[in-house]
Image (cartoon, rainbow, N blue to C red):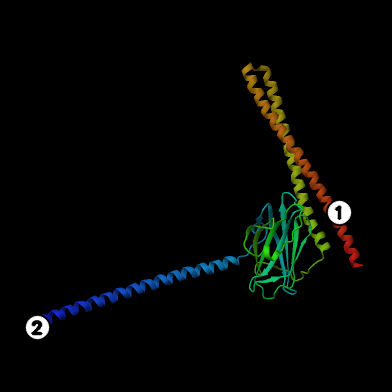
Amino acid sequence: MREKWQAKLAMWGERQDDKTNHLHGRAKYFYYVMALITLLCFSVLLVKIVTYEAGASEDSGTGKKSELSLGESSIQMISRKYNPNNHYLEILVQVQQEVVDLNKHTEVLVTEGEKKQRLAKKWIQVTDQYYVLSIPNVPQDWSVMFIDVGVIVMPENQAVEVDLDNLLGDTSGEKQKNDTTIYQDLWTVTREKTTTQQNLEPQSEPSYVIKYSELEIKESNKKLKEINQYIKELEKEIKKVEEKIKTLEGEKRYQISSEMEKTDQAILRFEGQIDAAQNKIISETEAGKELQEKINKLKLRQEDQRKLLKEEKK
């Protein structure tokens, strides 16, 4: 009897050992799976971090690629030049807006990307739409710059103190503070994508005004030419429609009453087209006059700045 119980105890012990070995095997498998999942998650996280860092340093480019829409203003970098000999960086910026608002102005902050160091700069408005961002003493080993751009809309007829360091340099978008509205976004400027110019030097404000007024004069002359061409096309279209009306008036002599009624309706539509075209000619002519006046004022300002430069050289 005792031997029989000892045999049963031995068999039960063997079964327990089998279960333990089986559980250990499953536990080991479970830990392997969890380790693999953890590794995969870490890899995905690492990829996201690396991608984000790469995206943050992606160059904003120039021209249309760099365009920022801030409120009703469209802002873009036209050109970027850097002189490695004197560590001077200069950026030409264009600010376009439909209506000139005296309560609205554009500001920038410049931060070196590696050490997050705020850099001294000059922000010079040289024409209605062109600004020069002048950055002297750029760190010799710079690789990326971050430029916060803000359009600040002040309360009408009120003077408000604006602390740029607090208003800009945070998150992009629209912000409100002390009845002041700030529209903000960011440019990334990399050294690799910036044109090198060995003889680039900071210039005086009159020199910038003379130089970039000429650029705006050329653009205005181009627009003026387009306006005049458009007016000529409208005048040609009016003559074509007038001929159609003349033809329809002649056909009425041979038409019955119902046909004449349809012809009169067609003539009314054509006359409406002529009125619309004539109104367009009036508005385009007025725009052309304003553009020519702007060109004349730019040329006058150039002359005044040239006189100022001559006086400075004396």
| Residue 164, image x, y percentages | 70, 64
Q: How far is the residue under mark 1 from the one under mark 2? A: 123 Å
**In the image, residue 218 above or below residue 132:** above
Category of crowding for the residue at label 2, using alpha-carbon neighbours closer than 10 angstroms: few (below 14), some (14–19), many (at least 20): few
156, 222: nearer the viewer = 156
**Residue located farthest toward the right when viewing the structure as drawn:** 314
| Occupied quadrant, residue 130 | bottom right
**Residue located farthest toward the left when viewing the structure as drawn:** 1
| Residue 232, image x, y percentages | 75, 39
Dot 1 or dot 2: first in sequence order is: 2
Q: Quadrant of the N terminus?
A: bottom left
| Occupied quadrant, residue 202 | bottom right
Confirm whether residue 52 shows in the render. Answer: yes
253, 214: nearer the viewer = 214
Please count the marks in the image. Answer: 2
Left or right of 195 in this view: 208: right
Residue named by callout 1 = 300
In the image, what residue occupies the spot 82% across and 63% down?
205
In the image, what residue occupies the spot 80% across and 56% down?
213
In the image, what residue occupies the spot 64% across and 16% down?
257
Confirm whether residue 256 shows in the render. Answer: no
Residue named by callout 2 = 3
